[in-house]
Amino acid sequence: MNDKLNFEAMLDFAIEEAKIGLAEGGIPIGAALFDGEGKLLGRGHNRRVQEDDPSIHGETDAFRKSGRQRSYRNTIMVTTLAPCWYCSGLVRQFNIGTVIIGESINFHGGVTWLKENGIKVIDMESNECIEMLGSYIRDNPEVWNEDIGQG
């Protein structure tokens, strides 16, 4: 992985996706997958509400839109919220080496488990991410409570 990568700029792609999801009436969680040099491979957002599909999380959407890679070890998953267990499993299954998260205040997910299994996890503690999802949870508690853990 390139040591000069701009994680904030990478997080901006995920934030943009989260805002798209919110504008569509969904949960504002976005993600993007990058190669080790910072080239965008794919991006996506949580569409569980919009498509009534519990499997379309931000991370899975970005992953699917990235196409097949020879290896995922040097890829970087960037997401606005700590990955849930489902998305943490995706990271482990495909050996994604680094996860950049916008925040883990509203939901801690599988962060500890990922770290325990050798995944480099960087929490950006983004106020924008914290507030965006926090506001959504306050305004839509019934949707969030149904969906808890489904990033």
Image (tube, rainbow, N blue to C red):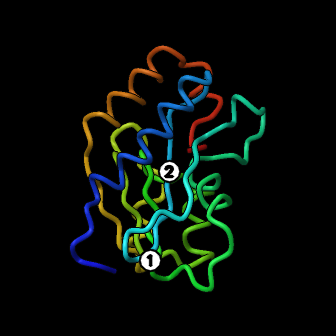
For residue 122, above or below residue 103: below
What residue appears at the point 38 percent right and 69 percent down from the top-left corner? 38
Outermost residue to the left:
4
SS for callout 2: strand
User: Which residue is pictured at 35% across the width and 66% down the height?
Assistant: 121
The numbered mark, 2 or 1, whose residue comes first in the sequence reads 2
Q: Which residue is more in the foreground, 121 or 64?
A: 64
Q: Residues within 10 Å of mark 2 (few under 14, many from 20)?
A: many
| Residue at (57, 54) in percent of width and height | 59
Quarter location, residue 15: top left
Q: In the picture, which quadrant includes the C terminus?
A: top right
Work out whether residue 123 or residue 31 is closer to the camera in this orientation and state it. 31
Residue 80 on image: x %, y %: 42, 45
Look at the picture and state if 150 lies above or below 132: below
Q: Quick check: 49 left or right of 145?
A: right
Residue furthest to the bottom in view is 70
Query: What is the quadrant of residue 64 in the picture?
Result: bottom right
Q: Secondary structure at mark 1?
A: loop
Image coordinates for residue 7, horizontal then vertical, percent: 29, 59
Where is residue 30 drawn, in percent x and y? 50, 44
Instruction: Please say if 31 is above or below 98.
Output: above
User: Which-is-in-front pick, marks 2 and 1?
Assistant: 2
Q: CA distance from mark 2 to mark 1?
A: 15 Å
- Residue 81 appears in the rendering: no
Residue kind at label 2, given as amino acid type: Ala
Work out which quarter of the rendered image holds the N terminus and state it: bottom left
The numbered dot on residue 97 is 1
| Residue at the spot of label 2 | 31
Does residue 76 appear to the left or right of 68 in the view shown? left
Residue 62: x and y, percent? 59, 55
